[in-house]
Image (cartoon, grey):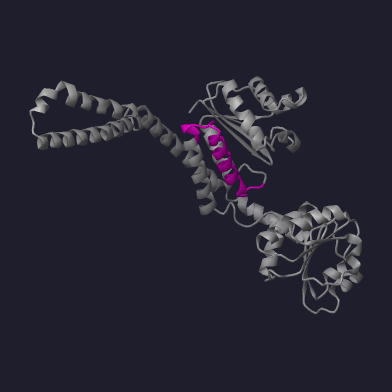
Amino acid sequence: MDSFKIIAFTHKNLPFDLIGKLHLNQDEQSTVLGAVKLNFGFDEFLFLSTCNRVELFISAQQEINSVFIKELILFLNSRLNNVEATTLSENAEVYVSDEAVEHILKVASSLDSLVVGEREIITQVRKAYDFCNLLGLTGDFIRLLTKQTIETAKDIYTNTDIAKNPVSVASLAYRQLRDLGIKNDARILFVGSGETNTILASYLQKHKFANFKVFNRSLANGEKLAKSLNGKAFELKTLASFKEGFDVLIVCTASSEPLITAEIFAQLNGSETSKKVIIDLAIPANVEESVAKNKHVTYIDINSLKAQAEANLQLRKNEIDKCEQIIKNKTEQFKWLHKERRIELAFGEVPRQVKAIKDLALNEVFAKEINLLDSNSKEVLEKVLSYVEKKYNAVAIKTAKEVLLNPRD
């Protein structure tokens, strides 16, 4: 496995914006990756790109150093300036052989992720393989490794708690809503259309909530979020006169002063007597203290969500030792799987040669003697030889595996 290497550009050593300059969309990958493989003489090549990493899986004999990496990334993106290319090449992580196998198992199992336990990475690895395989860039080694990688990640996600208990504020906020028994037809108001509210909105939409209103200082930005939710957008200044009522209010803006004052809450609530849920994801709080403490309000604030997120993240980190042991075992297992596969490939010619010997014996060497046999005898002889041929091939491969994989000295 010494020819297998991984070059990784990750959030651990590099800023996100610089990593992003190595990202290629699928059209760019279709154009560039085949040329990379051909130009550098790689036997196999896989390109993995996520929001916080770009990794290159390479099967080749070349020695990987900063000079080679710089040349490679400039081929991937010729628009990089010298400083950018040098920074990337000098801060890349390089893994070879067993370490490279162990590394990709950790990546797919999210142990190397920005947020430990996030499952998205396994899907990203699978899609990267499928696309590079479609382009004809991968071969038998990366195919076998990807299969082992996905099986390892599934094992870890199933048999450890590494992915249990959400660690993002948005997912925790959604879970609290779910635990409160909020119905799918609940009237949901968003105040603010930034990243946090957008992420939470995607959770709600995914789980079939459908009644949304969005209030935002910039109507154009509010309309973008509202459109994605099939909802309606309003300017923030109209919030105080909104009279359609609500069940859930989600607020997250950059305002340094509370936006949801007692007066605005009273206007929004109108004459309704049902208990309301307010989720305040802003720092500082966007909800006035008197509203948060109102007996008709279930108030969920960013501080309580962050505390739960940190506790859940610690629980995930407590599982890392268990996960690493699984990965070590799977790495050793892969080494044997790879050796077995090499033997199978090496012996791939044996069945053809045995068949050729059998055909030669039947049709030339012993042709005269066989022609003296009656048809039944010929048929029995053919069956016997085919049986011997099949069994010989199986015994030959089995014996080779036993000798090469279980040496006695």
| As drawn, 276 above or below 218 | below
Q: Nearer the viewer, residue 157 or 216?
A: 216
| As drawn, 349 above or below 12 | above
Residue 154 picture location, percent across and down: 52, 49
Q: Residue at coordinates 65% horizontally, 56% vertically from top-left?
A: 166
Q: Nearer the viewer, residue 198 or 285?
A: 198
Q: Residue at coordinates 63% horizontally, 22% vertically from top-left?
A: 65
Q: Main secondary structure of the magenta part?
A: helix
| 15 displayed left or right of 318 | right
| 406 displayed left or right of 225 | left
Q: Is residue 211 visible?
A: yes
In this picture, which residue range is highlighted in magenta? 115-142
Q: Is residue 141 magenta?
A: yes
Q: Residue at coordinates 49% horizontally, 45% vertically from top-left?
A: 151
The tally of labels here is 0
Quarter of the picture holding the C terminus = top left
Q: Nearer the viewer, residue 375 or 164?
A: 375
Residue 223 picture location, percent across and down: 82, 56
Residue 47 picture location, percent across and down: 60, 34
Residue 348 picture location, percent across and down: 35, 29
Q: Nearer the viewer, residue 263 or 103?
A: 263
Q: Is residue 93 visible?
A: no
| 133 displayed left or right of 307 | left
Q: Is residue 289 magenta?
A: no
| 48 displayed left or right of 249 | left
